Image (cartoon, grey):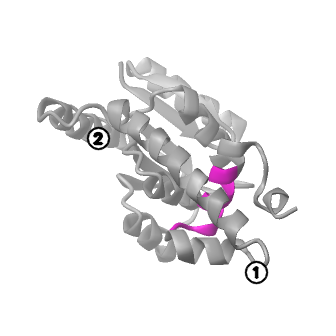
Amino acid sequence: MFTILVAEDDRELRELFCTVLSENGYRPLEAGDGEEALKVMETEYVDLIISDIRMPGMDGLALLQTIRDSGLRAEVLLVSGYTDFEYARKALQFGCAGYLVKPVEEKELTEYLVKIKQRLDENKAAGEGKAGGDKQEEGYQSEKLQVQAMVKYIQEHYAQALTLQVLSGEFKMSESYISSLIKKRTGKGFSEHLM
């Protein structure tokens, strides 16, 4: 079954999305923001994420960037109440599957879902596997190695003025992704590793 994670801070809208998804034969999962969505993805296989762009904490663009930086291949469909071209440009830059403007029409949503599912089914038939699957497991192993390298770097360069910006430049990842990755894999935030 096609699993879709809805990351939306508006509970009523999130529940509405999930109802529409269930009625159309999809398995919906819920998250109230980007951080919660990443936690769900640690334990659940996800084909597609439908995410609001503007949410407290980790927003949809940061979530999309984190997913891409981590090597996960889940598709992301971004939703926004804003028609600002800058949001759409950044979303496309990070490789989103689509961009919907609120209020979302059910027909438009289902059309996107059909296209995305068809593309994922074609990839699976071509031997690439599911959007997550083995690749997702490889991503988690890769994350583990990345964090080990980061912690080692922190220990070796402890005496220097270390910041997330320095790590970002060293490891070629966004500061927000490094911060969430270190916290997720070690249970301690970046600053706790400096103490």
Residue in the picture at 59% in, 51% down:
148
Q: Which residue is mark 2?
A: 116
Which is in the foreground here, disc 1 or disc 2?
1
Task: Using the image, tell me which numbered label, if any, was put on residue 113.
Answer: none
Residue 36 x/y as whole percent: 67, 40
**Number of numbered labels in the structure image:** 2
Q: Residues within 10 Å of mark 1 (few under 14, many from 20)?
A: few
Q: Quick one: 101 or 40, which is closer to the camera? A: 40
Find residue 177 and report its horizontal and vertical position in percent.
60, 59
Seen at 18% across and 38% down, the residue is: 123
Question: What span is colored magenta in the figure?
Answer: 173-182
> Which is nearer the N-term, disc 1 or disc 2?
2
User: Is 94 above or below relative to 86?
Assistant: above
Q: Position of residue 56 (x, y in %)?
A: 74, 55
Q: Residue furthest bottom?
A: 161
**Who is closer to the viewer here, 85 or 179?**
179
Front position in the image: 51 or 154: 154
Residue 179 part of the magenta segment = yes
> Helix, strand, or loop for circle 2?
helix
| Secondary structure mostly seen in the magenta stretch | helix
Q: Quadrant of the C terminus?
A: bottom right
The three-letter code of the residue at mark 1 reads: Gln
Say which quarter of the image contains residue 191: bottom right
Q: Position of residue 112 (x, y in %)?
A: 32, 43
